[in-house]
């Protein structure tokens, strides 16, 4: 895509993406993982509150989803994995440490297809989410106190770290979108960025083209939509180039996106010093992932979006665009079933992509067939689609009940044409005098008179014939 | 004596009434109606539990520790919470944030620690049994100094859920009682897999079947490094030597074994335990519970003052030490190195146990020392643990059983066994008790 | 036991004012850094106190360097345990009343803390 990168400069971007896993309970305790509707501090227990003496117990499903993700990203899945403690003080972190994975993450060394390219994945690891802070007055600098809600504390979190293989703001956005698509396809996360289920951080640096060394990077955080991600990265690239071109130096720091200022701004950092004192979590024995279990999970993976897109293009002759639009698992399944039921691939794709058709596959195939055979026109098809899906009827049934059958009978059409011509002598005269637009008006009148049921292709032929 | 920090009279009365009902209904077990004390580091639902620390003053946990819940289930009667060194860090109970506990055998001397209150309560006959915790010797050493039996089970034998953590990879819950059989009965009741503790083992526990099997034909290892340890008092050595002869007389074969890395145990321990403690004690930040300094203006200031004021000097010292050992640039030199030495020490024991069924030694190189005599010298205090902390580093079960006196004060005999051979350690200790006419 | 300014631990002579035979000491700046990491406030004179105390203990600990552990695997947990995971089944949470019962300061169901001003040293 077109992107304005100042001449002679190259951006280097690596992504760190946190996603909440689609489990029912939290990472280390049995509190529900769905905290969004809960009143403050009503979705907690002694474990996620970090009260004295409590111990974590790992949620098997979270590990399973971590392994599925690692496999889907083509990572090497660890035979032995381990949890570590990341120590820092912050009121939203109840224990004063976050249980995470440092030395032995669950997955290492994968790749994710993004657009036409590939971004290498450094690692995938599991950890726990923190609680939330509300600042009275909503301004960090003037607030006198903060309110702590720990409902989110302990929700299973997975971090996916990429290599710095991305070189544009569009690329960063596409990477995050491709990751979201993959995570949804394998059921690892709902990955809704607005709900905070997917949080993307970009490490951005720039360098002069041809330069081998990496520039000083900044970390962009607290971005809550794909659009903002793209804008933030774009703005940050420009800012860094401007700083360097004016002889300045980029400072390593954390920055956030300001929607009102339309630029990135420095953020206060949480830690007095970045010394997290990682060490193995003594409350959890090392986790030996059973090879047979991992293989079972591998075999259970659904078709991945990139694979599906390729197959849709190659097997059904779909365009890149349609294939991408159909890579959502539910849409793809509908598409393939409708085609299997005998409908034409391109027409089915068209109905799903353009009209967001959601019908049982048999019904969709029937609808496509009704339009293709000219029983109803495309416009009626939309009406049939709407009624069929609302009332759960088959399209043929809707057509029958509504009397929507297209008028294709030559004699009936001829009568209609004659009526219209007789009642609109002025338009007829205009047409004959060379005004082409008059034909449209006459056909429009005919359509109206037929209650929208006329087969307009045939009607046009008859009318042209009559108009001589 | 000062063994108890607080008595739980209402709870005890209710439990006693319930125990009477159960016993009358013929529904009682061996612990039904038995008065027990709980070390103040084990959470008791609704009862103030403070880990001997001012920072937890007033804290009432909304849950029972699993060991506590199991005693409750068994019908025991909770008399109260016993004094201990703050967060179980100490060997004399002098680090309690609340009060001193005196040794029932000599009120001018310490009861040992950190579970000094539990040991003293049992020694004074205030309860039949008590729960303690042992991270480097905190059950066995006070048991020795107070002349009672104390058991530190294999790591993973008893759930640590609800045990206010000091050093998670070393902590274990265990019982005190006046005799080995009573201690074994309590341990049997609290041991076993707990789904709330991922480090608790899902293995069968049968501590009583072989308890009276004696030592005839058993090989008992005597590590010369434990005999020659510096600071060993001659009276303690003499009492232990006598005990060894008595065991030999009962049919045991004494074999010399070697634990060549003994000298490094203390150093490894004083990296690993403080490192884990520095992290475990980070949760005392005054956000959700516990003491909060009132005079702070900012959040950072709240943290600094709360923790400075809420923790005592020994706890602060260990947090500093552990934080340093884990900090950037020092991790490999200290923490990782200590973990490797831990491997060497565990290997020493594994090799020794190829030659013997259990290892016997003194529990503490000294008898109970005068109150105040070691408080100014942290290393001198740490010396109390030299014979006990190896078992924690290696995860082994250990029992301390009284074996006579020196200077009129109790001496403890320590019996260590391989991992999961808790029954063997108890059997040897029980055999010694029998030889002594117990 | 005697009250002394020197004690003998496992053959190493240690005094309160440092260590004989080992030169390892902590600077006051290191003490400040560690205290800040640990969020432990220091009072007047405590930098020296901790520098002294920790140097003494570390002097003893430094003997670990004598051991060649190049080929030794670290032990994080001494007892090999099978890691038993939990099934993903939610259970009811703690009553909010009990959640807040031990809180030093609470309002409207939130825990209340002083505003964050982390730019300080």
Image: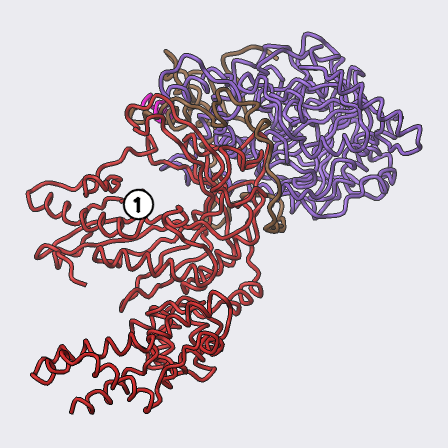
**Residue closest to the eye, A390 or B402:** A390
| Residue B63, image quadrant | top right
Look at the picture and state if A461 lies above or below A280.
Answer: below
For the colour red, the matching chain is A
**Camera-nearest residue between B268 and A131:** A131
Q: Residue at x 69, y 45 (%)?
A: B353
- Res. B106 in view: yes
Q: In the rendered view, does C61 fall on the left or right side of B219?
A: left
On the picture, is B110 further left or further right than B341?
A: right
Task: Please tell me which residue is depicted at 45% across the width and 18% down the height of the picture.
Answer: B306
**Which quarter of the picture shows residue B74?**
top right
Q: How is the image coloured?
A: by chain
Q: Is residue B237 above or below residue A341?
A: above
Q: Which chain is purple?
A: B
Instruction: Write down the region rendered in magenta.
Output: C24-33
Q: Label the magenta part by its dominant secondary structure.
A: helix
Percent position of residue B406, x then y? 74, 17
Where B418 falls versus B382 (above or below)? below
- Check disc 1 and report its element: helix, strand or loop: loop
- Report which residue position mark 1 lands on: A223
């Amino acid at each position: 895509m077109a992107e304005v990168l100042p001449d002679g400069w190259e951006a280097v971007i690596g992504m760190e993406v946190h996603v909440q896993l689609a489990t029912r309970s939290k990472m280390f305790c049995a509190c529900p993982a769905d905290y969004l509707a809960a009143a403050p501090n009503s979705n907690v227990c002694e474990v996620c509150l970090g009260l004295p003496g409590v111990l974590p117990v790992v949620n098997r499903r979270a590990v399973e989803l971590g392994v599925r993700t690692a496999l889907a990203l083509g990572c090497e899945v660890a035979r032995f994995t381990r949890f570590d403690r990341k120590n820092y003080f912050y009121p939203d972190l109840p224990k004063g440490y976050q249980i995470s994975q440092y030395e032995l993450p669950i997955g290492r060394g994968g790749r994710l297809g993004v657009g036409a390219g590939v971004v290498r994945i450094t690692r995938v690891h599991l950890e726990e989410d923190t609680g939330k802070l509300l600042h009275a007055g909503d301004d960090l600098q003037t607030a006198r106190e903060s309110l702590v809600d720990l409902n989110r504390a302990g929700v299973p979190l997975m971090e996916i770290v990429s290599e710095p293989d991305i070189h544009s703001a569009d690329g960063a956005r596409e990477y995050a979108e491709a990751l979201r698509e993959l995570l949804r396809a394998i059921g690892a996360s709902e990955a809704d960025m607005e709900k905070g289920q997917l949080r993307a951080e970009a490490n951005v640096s720039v360098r002069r083209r041809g330069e081998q060394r990496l520039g000083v990077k900044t970390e962009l955080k607290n971005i809550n939509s794909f659009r903002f991600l793209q804008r933030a990265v774009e703005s940050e690239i420009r800012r860094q180039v401007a700083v360097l071109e004016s002889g300045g130096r980029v400072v390593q720091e954390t920055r956030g996106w300001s929607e009102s200022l339309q630029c990135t701004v420095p953020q206060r950092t949480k830690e007095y010093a970045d010394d997290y004192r990682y060490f193995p979590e003594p409350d959890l024995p090392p986790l030996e992932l059973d090879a047979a279990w991992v293989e079972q999970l591998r075999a259970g993976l659904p078709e991945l979006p990139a694979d599906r897109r390729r197959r849709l293009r190659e097997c059904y002759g779909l365009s890149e665009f349609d294939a991408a639009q159909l890579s959502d698992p539910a849409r793809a399944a509908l598409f393939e079933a409708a085609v299997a039921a005998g409908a034409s691939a391109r027409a089915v794709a068209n109905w799903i992509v353009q009209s967001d058709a959601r019908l049982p596959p048999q019904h969709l195939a029937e609808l496509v067939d009704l339009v293709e055979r000219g029983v109803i026109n495309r416009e009626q098809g939309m009406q049939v689609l709407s009624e069929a899906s609302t009332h759960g009827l088959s399209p043929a049934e809707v057509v029958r009940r509504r009397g929507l059958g297209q008028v294709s009978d030559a004699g009936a059409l001829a009568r209609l044409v004659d009526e219209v011509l007789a009642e609109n002598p002025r338009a007829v005269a205009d047409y004959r005098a060379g005004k082409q637009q008059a034909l449209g008006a006459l056909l429009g009148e005919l359509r109206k008179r037929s209650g929208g049921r006329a087969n307009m292709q045939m009607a046009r032929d008859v009318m042209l014939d009559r108009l001589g | 004596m000062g063994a108890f920090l607080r008595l739980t009279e209402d709870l005890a009365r209710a439990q006693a009434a319930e125990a009477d009902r159960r016993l009358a209904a013929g529904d009682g077990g061996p612990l039904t109606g038995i008065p027990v004390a709980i070390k103040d580091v084990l959470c008791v639902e609704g009862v103030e539990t403070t880990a001997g620390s001012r920072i937890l003053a007033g804290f009432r946990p909304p849950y029972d520790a699993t060991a506590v819940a199991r005693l409750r289930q068994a019908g025991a009667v909770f008399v109260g919470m016993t004094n201990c060194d703050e967060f179980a860090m100490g060997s004399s109970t002098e680090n309690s944030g609340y009060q001193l506990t005196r040794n029932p055998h000599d009120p001018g001397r310490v009861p040992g620690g950190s579970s000094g209150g539990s040991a003293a309560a049992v020694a004074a006959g205030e309860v039949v049994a008590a729960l303690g915790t042992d991270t480097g010797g905190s059950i066995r050493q006070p048991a020795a100094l107070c002349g009672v039996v104390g058991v530190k089970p294999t790591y993973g034998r008893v759930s640590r859920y609800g045990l206010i953590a000091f050093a998670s990879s070393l902590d274990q819950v265990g019982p005190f009682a006046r005799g080995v059989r009573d201690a074994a009965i309590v341990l049997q009741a609290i041991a076993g897999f707990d789904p709330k503790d991922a480090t608790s083992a899902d293995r069968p526990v049968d501590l009583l079947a072989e308890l009276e099997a004696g030592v005839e034909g058993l090989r008992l290892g005597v590590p010369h490094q434990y005999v020659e340890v510096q600071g060993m008092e001659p009276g303690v050595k003499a009492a232990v030597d006598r005990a060894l002869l008595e065991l030999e007389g009962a049919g045991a074969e004494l074999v010399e074994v070697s634990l060549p890395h003994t000298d490094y145990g203390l150093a490894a321990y004083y990296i690993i335990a403080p490192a884990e403690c520095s992290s475990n004690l980070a949760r005392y930040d005054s956000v959700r519970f516990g003491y909060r300094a009132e005079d702070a203006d900012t959040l950072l200031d709240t943290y600094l003052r709360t923790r400075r004021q809420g923790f005592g000097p020994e706890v602060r010292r260990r947090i500093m030490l552990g934080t340093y050992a884990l900090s950037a640039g020092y991790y490999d030199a200290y923490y990782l190195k200590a973990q490797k030495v831990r491997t060497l020490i565990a290997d020493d024991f594994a090799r020794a146990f190829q030659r013997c069924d259990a290892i016997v030694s003194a529990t503490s190189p000294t008898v109970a020392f005068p109150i105040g005599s070691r408080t100014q010298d942290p290393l001198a205090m740490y010396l109390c643990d030299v014979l006990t902390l190896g078992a924690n580093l290696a995860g082994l079960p250990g029992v301390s059983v009284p074996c006579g006196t020196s200077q009129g004060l109790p001496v403890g005999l320590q019996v260590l066994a391989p991992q999961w051979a808790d029954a063997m350690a108890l059997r040897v200790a029980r055999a010694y008790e029998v030889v002594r006419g117990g | 036991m005697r009250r002394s300014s020197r004690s003998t631990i496992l053959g190493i002579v240690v005094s309160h004012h440092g260590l004989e035979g080992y030169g390892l000491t902590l600077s006051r700046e290191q003490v400040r850094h560690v205290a800040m990491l640990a969020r432990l406030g220091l009072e007047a004179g405590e930098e020296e106190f901790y520098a002294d105390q920790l140097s003494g203990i570390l002097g003893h600990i430094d003997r670990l360097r004598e051991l060649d552990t190049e080929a030794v695997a670290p032990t994080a947990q001494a007892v090999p345990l099978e890691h038993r995971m939990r099934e993903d089944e939610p259970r009811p949470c703690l009553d909010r009343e009990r959640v807040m019962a031990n809180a030093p300061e609470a309002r409207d169901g939130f825990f209340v803390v002083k505003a964050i001003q982390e730019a300080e040293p």
